[in-house]
Image (tube, rainbow, N blue to C red):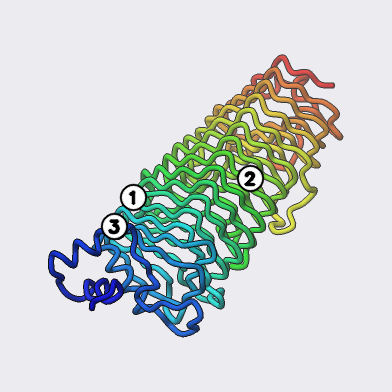
Amino acid sequence: MTNRRQLLTGMASAALSMSAFQRAFAQQFVDANEFGLEAADTGDQSGKFQMAVDAAAALQQPLYLAAGTYQISNIAVSRPIIIRGAPGATLRLGAGDAILLLGDCSDVVLEGLTFDGIDALGRDGALLSITNAQRITVQNCTFLRAGTGINAYNMQGRIENCALSNIADTAIHANDSGGIDILGNIIARCGNGGIRVWRSQSGPDGARIWGNRISDIDWVAGGNGQNGNGINVFRADNVSISDNHIVNCAFSAIRLNATKNTRVIGNHCQDSGEVSIFSEFGFSGSIISDNLIDGGAAGISMTNFNDGGRLSVCQGNIVRNLLERSPNNPDTVPYGIGVEADAAVTGNVIEGVPGTGIAVGWGPYLRDVLVNDNMVRECTIGIAVSVAPGAGHARISDNVVSGSGEHAIIAAQWDEIVSRDLPADADQFPNVAIEGNSVI
């Protein structure tokens, strides 16, 4: 008599009679353990798990994995399927590069699984590799002890409510994606990055990153900003980053490099080792608003006009309690907000900066900047504006500067202060319009 295990195993390799299909289809799910998977087996069970995946996909039924630890690697998923684990269902990496390989597929759901790399911290691969995939959902999963947690190339879908920790390189790396949502994840103790959204060439991406908790991101691979970031967006346009809680990153909580039309809204950034929110190198169209920055070496930077960085709004942020120096980048000096070109800086509150509250331009790199209605308190210098040869126009109006340690509003040529009281000396600097500021 043919039992269910024999029936489903046969389906993985040969055609079945119509009655056999009907019997299998009548079940609500496929039990992976019917293929001989055993939680107590410490050997490789990849072949058995692959048969279970193929059978469930053929039946168009969810694959259920009972609690236990199963050593597998390089399991290929190429058809629509739901793989759901019971609490405690753990997939442990065997000798291969990855646990699951999703490729050229769509409509795949992974839910409630633990991916354990065990000793893969020195490997370059990812526990979950996704390539050329649409409508993918990874939810309520855990990723532990790996080189990379999830590597997604040309993926559209969602990664949500997952926990990723003790990752040697990056927790989630999405490259050349086409609309990926990364939300509600907990990411901790990563060697080089929390979430990376990159593209091989600049172009539309549309990633949405919100509601994640990210902490303790190191920069083991070194560099001057490509590593050590909670969220890093590189050459990816039309990305939204909102309502994330990011603590203790070696460099930036949020770093945008060569991006267009990026929104950074409502994030909590604490104790960053360099610039907390950095929009740099050829960016345009950054909106940075309603963020709270507490601690760190510097607050918000929208600079690199020399490399084409321009066009930004910085509004409604709080920056407070900055460090005297960066623990990781000796070139970083403390400032609350730095801005250079085609930008509005309005309605921000900056307090407790052992440097400049708002730095407007650097040398000749200044063009069309509006700084108005900000509150700058207890900074060494309140507002500094570049008046170096070649510097463009800035308007400084209706700001409140209170309790400055040395000077309230100054004019500077690079590092040199050329006016300690810019409002009084405004006639000497035609590139600056200044009015209505209150100095207390």
Nearer the N terminus, badge 1 or badge 3?
Answer: 3
**Rounded to the nearest whole Å, what is the CA distance between mark 2 and mark 3?**
34 Å
Mark nearer the viewer, 1 or 2: 1
Question: Residue 355, image x and y in percent?
Answer: 78, 41
Q: Which residue is mark 1?
A: 135
Above or below, 47 against 354 in this view is below
Task: Tell me residue 120's x, y (percent).
Answer: 53, 75
**Which element carries disc 2, helix, strand or loop?**
strand
Name the residue type under label 3.
Pro
Q: Image quadrant of residue 5?
A: bottom left
Residue type of the residue flagged with mark 1: Arg
Q: Secondary structure at mark 3?
A: loop
Instruction: State left or right for residue 294 relative to residue 309.
Output: right
The residue under label 2 is: 245
| SS for dot 1 | strand
Q: Answer few, some or many: residues within 10 Å of disc 1's Cα (few below 14, many 20 plus, some between 14 and 19).
A: some
* Nearest the eye: 11 or 211: 11
Q: Quadrant of residue 431?
A: top right
The residue labelled by disc 3 is 80
The nearer-to-camera label among 2 and 3 is: 3
**Furthest residue to the bottom?**
43
Q: Earlier in the sequence, mark 1 or mark 2?
A: 1
Left/right placement of residue 85 relative to residue 299 reads left
In percent of width and height, residue 83 lies at 39, 61
Q: CA distance from mark 1 to mark 2?
A: 27 Å
The residue mark sitting in front, 1 or 3, is: 3
Q: Residue at x 68, y 20 (%)?
A: 373
**Above or below, comparing residue 46 to residue 67 in the picture:** below
